[in-house]
Amino acid sequence: MPLPQERIHTIDDIYNLPEGERAELINGQIYYMAPPSTAHQRTLSFLHLEIGNHIRNNNGSCEVFPAPFAVFLQAEDEKSNTNYLEPDISVICDKDKLNSKGCNGAPDWIIEIVSPSSKPMDYYTKLSLYREAGVREYWIVDPLRQIILVYDMEHGDSPVIHSFNDSIPVRIYPGFSIDFSQLKL
C-alpha cells in the first residue's frame, strides 16, 4: 500500500485563513503562529521606533516594516506559491522589491523576536532560509533570555551574542546602534 502523500500548501491557503489567524508557509508547509506576548510586542515596538527614527532622521532610503508584512524571500516565491514569511521586522533598501503584497526578494535586515513556540523556527529554519536568500543582517532577539544573536551574513562573520544591557551596532548602517538598555520589558 502506498504511503499517503503530504499535502503541499500554497499562498492561497495562507490568504484563505480565518480572519485574525496568522501562519507562515515554508516549502509548502504551514506553520501557525501563536499570538505574541506583551514582552514580544514591547520589543517589536521599541525596535520599529528606533530603526524608523534612525532612517527618518538620516534621510535614509530604506524602509522598516513590522509584522504582519509578507516576505517572499526569492522573487519567484510569490509565483511558485510555496513560501511566505512574516518576519517581526523587515528592513528593505531596494524599493523595486516592494509591491502591494509585500517584499519580493530578501530584505536587507531581518529581526525575529523569539517566543517559546518559535525557537526552533527562528534559530534554525529561518536562519538557513535567510542566509540562502541573501539577507545581509539577521538578529534573533530573545526577550526571555535577554540576549540578541547577531548574524552579519553579508560578511560571513561568526554570530555575536549581546545582552539587553548592550548597545548593538547595526552593520548595514555604519554609525547606528540600538541601545537595548533603553528597552523596558
Image (cartoon, rainbow, N blue to C red):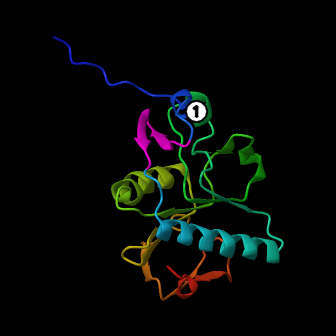
Q: Nearer the viewer, residue 165 or 155?
A: 165
Residue 56 appears left or right of 180: right
Quadrant (top left, top right, bottom left, bottom right) of the N terminus: top left
Residue 16 appears left or right of 118: right
Q: Is residue 23 above or below residue 59?
A: above
Residue 117 location in percent, x, y?
Answer: 35, 56
- Residue reaching furthest right? 59
Is residue 111 highlighted in magenta? no
User: Crowding near pointer 1: few (<14 within 10 Å), some, many (20+)?
Assistant: few
Picture quadrant of residue 144: bottom left
Q: Secondary structure at mark 1?
A: helix
Q: State whether residue 166 appears in this view.
A: yes
Residue 68 location in percent, x, y?
Answer: 60, 51
Q: Is residue 165 above or below residue 119?
A: below
For mark 1, what is the residue?
15
User: What is the count of numbered marks?
Assistant: 1
Q: State whether residue 139 appears in this view.
A: no
Q: Residue at x 41, y 26 (%)?
A: 8
Highlighted magenta segment, given as a residue range: 20-33
Residue 98 location in percent, x, y?
Answer: 73, 47
Please name the amino acid that badge 1 sits on: Tyr
Q: Residue at x 39, y 51 (%)?
A: 125
Residue 26 location in percent, x, y?
Answer: 45, 40
Q: Is residue 1 above or below residue 58?
A: above
- Residue reaching furthest top? 1
Q: Residue at x 44, y 81 (%)?
A: 162
Q: Residue at x 72, y 70 (%)?
A: 52
Picture quadrant of residue 161: bottom left
